[in-house]
Image (cartoon, rainbow, N blue to C red):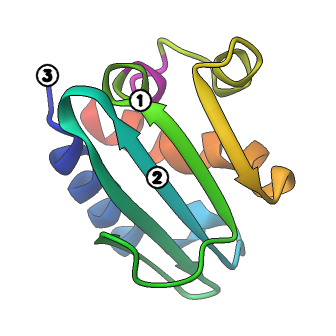
């Protein structure tokens, strides 16, 4: 199974290949990963590009806090983001509308794995 770092690297490469995956979203998503692979990543989306940085580079519009194991399940499609939020596995601060659109972006990772 991929590490958290590898997952974010793949998300970035997919966004670089096809920026339309972000579908016009202009936002900074911050992922506070807890547990075994504790780390912080930001997915920075602009109208014509997307990038991933490790750490806090910009002010986040939407911050998601999730355990590394649960995050991996979410990007692999084994854990629905809404269910994760409702069950307390995923905490969201900031723009909830952006959080709802996140699944589309994470699906870029799932598609790239196949």
Mark 1 highlights which residue?
71
Left or right? Give the position of 92 relative to 57.
Answer: right
User: In front: mark 3 or mark 2?
Assistant: 2
Q: Which mark is residue 1?
A: 3
Q: Secondary structure at mark 3?
A: loop
Give me the residue at 31% from left, 70% from top. Answer: 55
**Main SS, magenta residues:** helix
- Give coordinates of residue 25: x percent, y percent: 71, 72
Say left or right for 89 vs 69. Answer: right
In the foreground, 51 or 53: 53
Q: Which residues are magenta?
A: 73-77
- Mark linked to residue 31: 2
How far apart are the alpha carbons under marks 2 and 1? 9 Å
Give the spatial CA distance, label 3 vs label 2.
19 Å
86 to 49, vertically: above or below: above
User: Residue 82: within the magenta?
Assistant: no
Q: Residue 55, relative to residue 113: is it above or below?
A: below
Q: Residue drawn at (19%, 27%), measured in percent from left and top? A: 36
Which callout, 1 or 3, points at the residue further toward the start of the chain? 3
* Quadrant assignment, res 109: top left
Lower position in the chain sequence, tag 3 or tag 2: 3
- The answer to whether marks 3 and 2 mark residues whose Cβ atoms lie closer than 8 Å is no
**Residue closer to the observer: 37 or 49:** 37
User: Which class describes the residues within 10 Å of circle 2: few (<14), some (14-19), or many (20+)?
Assistant: many
Who's the residue at 48% across and 25% down the image? 74
Q: Earlier in the sequence, mark 2 or mark 1?
A: 2
Against 45, is 63 above or below?
above
Residue 97: x percent and y percent? 85, 53
Does 8 sit left or right of 61 as displayed?
A: left
């Amino acid at each position: 199974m991929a590490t958290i770092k590898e997952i974010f690297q793949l998300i970035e490469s997919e966004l670089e290949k096809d920026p339309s995956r972000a579908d016009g979203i202009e936002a900074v998503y911050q992922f506070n990963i807890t547990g075994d692979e504790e780390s912080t990543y930001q997915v920075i989306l602009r109208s014509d590009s997307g990038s991933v940085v490790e750490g806090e580079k910009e002010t986040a519009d939407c911050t998601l806090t999730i355990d590394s194991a649960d995050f991996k399940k979410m990007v692999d499609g084994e854990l629905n983001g809404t269910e994760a939020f409702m069950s307390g596995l995923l905490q969201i601060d900031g723009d909830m509308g952006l959080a709802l659109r996140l699944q589309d972006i994470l699906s870029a990772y799932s598609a790239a794995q196949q």
